[in-house]
Amino acid sequence: MADESQDFRRFVLGFINSEFVHIKSLHNVESILRKAEEDKKVLEDQACCGNSHLSHLLVSDPDLGAKKVRHSCCKLSTVSSEVPKKIEGAVQDARDSVYHIKDITKEQTQISHDITSHLTQTQPIKKDLSQFTTQVEEVERYVQYLRWLTFFEEMSEFEEVVKQLGWPFLGVSTHVPLRVPRPTHQELTFRLETLFDQLLKIQLPDTMIGRRRRSSQTSVVSDEGDRPLLLPLQLLLKPLRKRFKFHFTGSKQTNALDKPEWYLTQILGWIRDHADFLDHNIQPLLNKAGYPHVEAKVEFTRGLLTLVADKLAQDMDSLVYDEHLFSHTIDEVLLFDRELRGLYSYPASQPGVLHVLTVQDTFNRWITVERKFAVEKMDLLFSSETAWTSQYGEIEDVDDMKTGECAEGFMTLMLALTDRYKPLPSAANKLQFLDLQLELLDDFRIRLTQVMKSEAQDPLGSTFLSILNAVNYVISVLREWADTVFFLQLQYYRAERYSASRDLSLPQEPDLSSLQGAVFDELITLFQLLRSDMLSVVCNLVFTEMKARSKDYKDEKWLGLPSDKEYISRAVSASACPLLLLLKDRLHQLQLQLANPLFSRVWQTLADIINTFIMEEIILTNHFNEGGAAQLQFDMTRNLFPLFGEYTPRPDNYFKDVKEACLLLNLKPGSAMLLKEMLNKALNGSKIDPNTEKESPEKVLMDMGVFKLSIQEAERVLNLRANWPARKKGRS
């Protein structure tokens, strides 16, 4: 029964929530009540019908009929008694809510009435405050008006004073005109100081600050560059601005696109002519007024540079369509910036005019023009008849790298390109130029490779060797550049390019202590591979020629040559002369045509190859009597080694195998026999008597001067000897 009551309660709550969604739904209560009474009547009618059914059921099955009657009566009693009570309670709660809402509405109306009454009472005060505000604004306008009158009076008087002092100084070396008497000059100086101080104290609104807003073409400037000049300095610049506008805008002949040097030179002249006056007259006034951090000459220069930047940005719209005028203008602007920073000591931290060149469209055009001119220059260099001839000829003291005009001209082009983009203010722009530089260097390497392959049939020809010199020269220059601070900074920026969201977030002076690698590492590796290949070709050719002339020397009858006793003076073997003469000629030729570092590598490589060849192809394949060993040693130490003595004080150090083999072959028979026995015992694992063998075989070989050959190699060389002492009879 409790469960049914709980279900019924939930049914009633759901019914009320669905029927009475809003307070305005309460007017439906009566209609719902009527509907409930109608539903009740329907249930009663159904109950009557059920009675007839129950009567029939009672006749057929008395027990079941009795149960049905009791159950139906129970349900009917619940419906007829509880439902109306619940509904009436819900209706009463809704009526109480309506009454409460009406009370709240009355309170709201009263509060609104009170507010309206208060506003009505304060209306006169509001009118008085409005009048006072109007009067204050009017007073402020009067004050501003008076200040402007003072400003214009002082500004006019300031301009008149500096004019009497001779400002602006156009081509005059001194700031005091001779026509101004000394007392008048002192009086003007005092008035200048007074007016200068008063102008510094006048606070002007932004609309009159005189700030030179950048156009869209020159919007990329630092905050420092956009900082306004002090008012007195702006007034000093005013007559120069007028002159600049008069001469370099409009239809004046001096406003020529093909002559940017005219207005750039004019700006530098004005800086020069006014520097003395600014340092001696204006800077002390700034220091005294509390502006010691402001440098008069620097600020004056910065103001003039805004004229250049605006003029340059305006001209760029026309210059980009003529690559020659465009390139000429860039050259002049870069030269202007270099002179400005160098000759006129304009700080590198201050903005110049190069930002105009880094605007996206202009900068892209600049990159394109630089690439085109560089490629055209390369074409001219490679097609020149003197491309592979050193411009210094045979003067070794001037050019020990023996660089041809092609390579030197190209690296000069790369150096000029570096100087052009080095002063750019943005690291991102520098990296774009670096990418162009790397692209051009790789193009130059590919061109060198193509020409080298076309000259491969004559590796000892002047063109092939000059290309080898060119490759070596590029490697040397790139290594030198890679260690400079500028390219180390670019390597840092390059490594940080993808981790930094904006270029401005990169430090201007990065920490280079932990930097790894250099910007040219990949290119240097490629050039080194090309150099190694070409060196191998040269050395292999010389060795092949020498090997072809060594057949007779290899077949020399080393076992039948006379000993020293049969010679008055031993001479070089006749069969060795062809290969020695060839080697001498080739070394001399290579020394004349190759750069010193390259030739050092060539002769050292040849010495190593020849050392191995003589050891393996001549010594180890023959047997030697006393005369043959002596002749071999004479040929090596008195003829072969001295060929390389011109390039090193100890040439025998590069032929250690041959030198030590000759030493072993020319040992006295007794010493050779003892040494051979010792080596045999060491190699065969025999026990060495400590009473007779006090030193190891290695130590004995070192004492004899054999350091390079191993025990096995030394024993093998000793076995090539034919002169051994005769054994005494009875001795095993």
Image: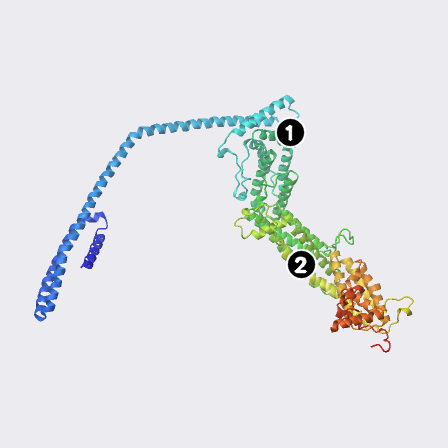
Please identify the residue farthest to the top as the structure is shown: 183
Question: Residue 226 location, x and y as percent?
Answer: 54, 39
From the image, tell me which residue sits under label 1: 175
Residue type of the residue flagged with mark 2: Phe
The label number, if any, that marks residue 527 in the structure image: 2
In the image, which disc is placed on residue 701? Answer: none
Q: Secondary structure at mark 1?
A: loop
Classify residue 548 as left or right of residue 274. Answer: right
The kind of residue tagged 1 is His
Instruction: Give coordinates of residue 648: x percent, y percent.
Output: 79, 58
Q: Nearer the viewer, mark 2 or mark 1?
A: 2
Q: Does residue 493 sit above or below 569 in this rendering?
A: above
Label 1 environment density (alpha carbons within 10 Å; few <14, some 14–19, many ≥20): some
Residue visible at 84% across and 70% down in the picture:
670
Q: Quick one: quadrant of the C terminus?
A: bottom right
566 to the left or right of 268: right
